[in-house]
Image (tube, rainbow, N blue to C red):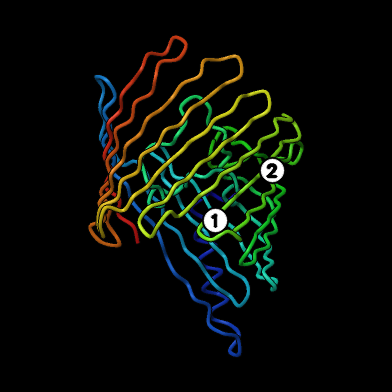
Amino acid sequence: MKSNHTLAVAFLAAASTIAAHGADAPAPAVTFDGYAVVQATSVDTTSSLDLYAAKFGATGKFGNVTGYASLYYGGAKTDLLDAYFTVDVGGGLSITTGKFLSYMGYEAFDVPNMTQISYANTQLSPVPAYHTGIKADYSTAVYGAGVAVVDSLYGYGNAPYKGDGSLRKPGLEAYYTYKGIKDVTIWFGAANEVATKYAFYDLWVSYAVSKTDSIGAEYIKIESEGSLWLLAYTKALDSKWSLTSRISGDSPTGGENNLKYTLSPSYSVNEHFIVRAEASYVTSYGTTPSASTFAAQTIFKF
């Protein structure tokens, strides 16, 4: 079995080989992206400062086929995160195979795409993140839909960056999104893993109130596990500053409900560098006492 590093090198080597052949074929476009995040966190009497996350990715375009691979450091080890190819079939339809990010979840995986530092929920963390399989997506100006068959929904031994690598308990995902209402996006997804039979339902809605303000709301239900929700409001204060306010909650089956309050300002030095801070408060639940967390990030992206 090839190592993660070898797989990434092989991907780039393949891109170079294709570029070197086929005089009549258009030259492939290879681009790079990535980010590095340093985070300081203070919770009660403990504090930390460390490299929180780093990612390096390469995209290769070969006609109607696009390939992407990325390496990701999540604070403990480096993983091969993305490794997939997408074929543009035409008419709004595309087919993707490889290792890719789950459809599920309103809040972004990549740090530069978030509007705050922490995720909304503290007890339940259901979004499966990455897995391997095949998916088909169809999109128009009014709606979009997709379906995926993957090795598993939830990470095993390497969560959340990898599925279990076995089709003995495959996962199924599907979504539908409607964009026919001006400035509104409605998204609904469902997922199930054959072995666990924990059906997963995710509904979120976003509304661009104005050019500077937006609202997002999400509700997730996990069969036999519980439910969770969030409501977030993001306002651009000027061309550099923005502020996100969020309230969220977990309701685990047979457990204690809790609420989380979050306030997170961001400052964009330029298109490549962001400074972000966050103050959050989680109410007590069960034997867990209330807790306040303060964090700050510097985000470099390219």
Residue drawn at x 69%, y 66% as measured from the top left: 93
In-front residue for pair 181/272: 181
Circle 1: residue type: Leu
Left or right: 195 in relation to 205 = right
Residue drawn at x 65%, y 37% as measured from the top left: 201
Query: Which circle, 1 or 2, is nearer the viewer?
Result: 2
Q: Residues within 10 Å of mark 2 (few under 14, many from 20)?
A: many
Task: Find residue 147 and report its horizontal and vertical position in percent.
Answer: 71, 52
Residue drawn at x 60%, y 78% as measured from the top left: 63
- Residue at the spot of label 1: 7
Quarter of the image containing the C terminus?
bottom left
Label 1 sits on a secondary structure element that is: helix
Can you tell which mark lies on residue 151? Answer: 2
Task: Find residue 203 and report its horizontal and vertical position in percent.
Answer: 60, 42
> Where is residue 159, by image quadrant?
top right
Task: Find residue 48 and report its horizontal and vertical position in percent.
Answer: 26, 31
On screen, 212 above or below 295? below
On screen, 63 above or below 213? below
On screen, 146 above or below 285? below
Give the residue at the far top of this rendering: 287
On screen, 287 above or below 84? above
In-front residue for pair 176/58: 176
Left or right: 114 in relation to 99 = left
Give the residue at the far bottom of this rendering: 24
Circle 2: residue type: Asp
In-front residue for pair 264/39: 264
